[in-house]
Image (tube, grey):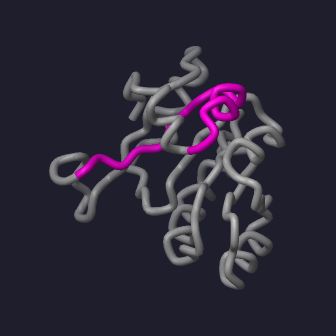
Amino acid sequence: MLSVLIPTANNAAQLALMMRDMVPAAVDGLVRQLIVVDAAPDAETLLLSSDSGADLFREGLAAAAGTAKWELLLVCPPHLRLPEGWRDRLSSAVVGGVREGRVYGARAGGLVGLVGPRSFAILAHRDTVIAAGDFVGLQRRIRGPRIV
């Protein structure tokens, strides 16, 4: 149903946690492809990408989006911890025709968006991600709706 892109910069510990969050979604069939985007990956990121079966791109988010197998992409910062029930809500939204929006993350202790800046993933069409160029550009283009 969708490809997941994880833009990172030598952050293997956070990347491993994000990948762990994606395993049940892959088993359910929601996530069909995982792409790690890192311009200068360290040995840990290379190993983690290889061992998990993720594609690794060094050319940037737009280039990675251009090679995604699915038209619908979920772009997840590696530090984001997805909240309980995110898979079901995102899957329902996609099946219901939602093609863009934000998936907000859980904070430490399970709190969602109560203190500090809000972390989120972005659901968008491949062409939108390519046109945005990077995650900051994508944030400017996709301001809502809130999916999770």
At which x and y percent is residue 71? 75, 29
In the figure, is residue 77 to the left or right of 63? left
- Total numbered circles: 0
Q: Is 30 rendered above or below residue 12?
A: above
Instruction: Give left or right: position of 86 versus 10.
Output: left
The residue shown at (53%, 35%) is 138
Image spot of residue 4 (x, y percent): 65, 46
- Judging depth in this view, the residue of 41 and 79 nearest the camera is 41
Using the image as rendered, state which of residue 146 and residue 63 is in the foreground: 63
Above or below, comparing residue 44 to residue 108 in the picture: below
Q: Which residue is more in the foreground, 1 or 132?
A: 132
In the displayed structure, 131 sits above or below 84; it is: above
Q: Position of residue 89 (x, y in %)?
A: 46, 32
**Residue located 25% across and 48% down the image:** 112
The N terminus sits in image quarter: top right
Q: Which residues are magenta?
A: 117-134
Q: Quadrant of the C terminus?
A: top left
Q: Is 68 placed above or below 84 here? A: above
In the rendering, at what x and y percent does residue 127 appear?
71, 26
Q: Residue furthest left?
A: 115
Magenta-colored stretch includes residue 131:
yes
Q: Quadrant of residue 48?
A: bottom right
> To which quarter of the image does residue 70 belong?
top right
**Residue occupying image coordinates x 53% and y 24%:** 100
Q: Residue furthest bottom?
A: 43
Question: Residue sitting at 67 percent across and 64 percent down?
Answer: 38
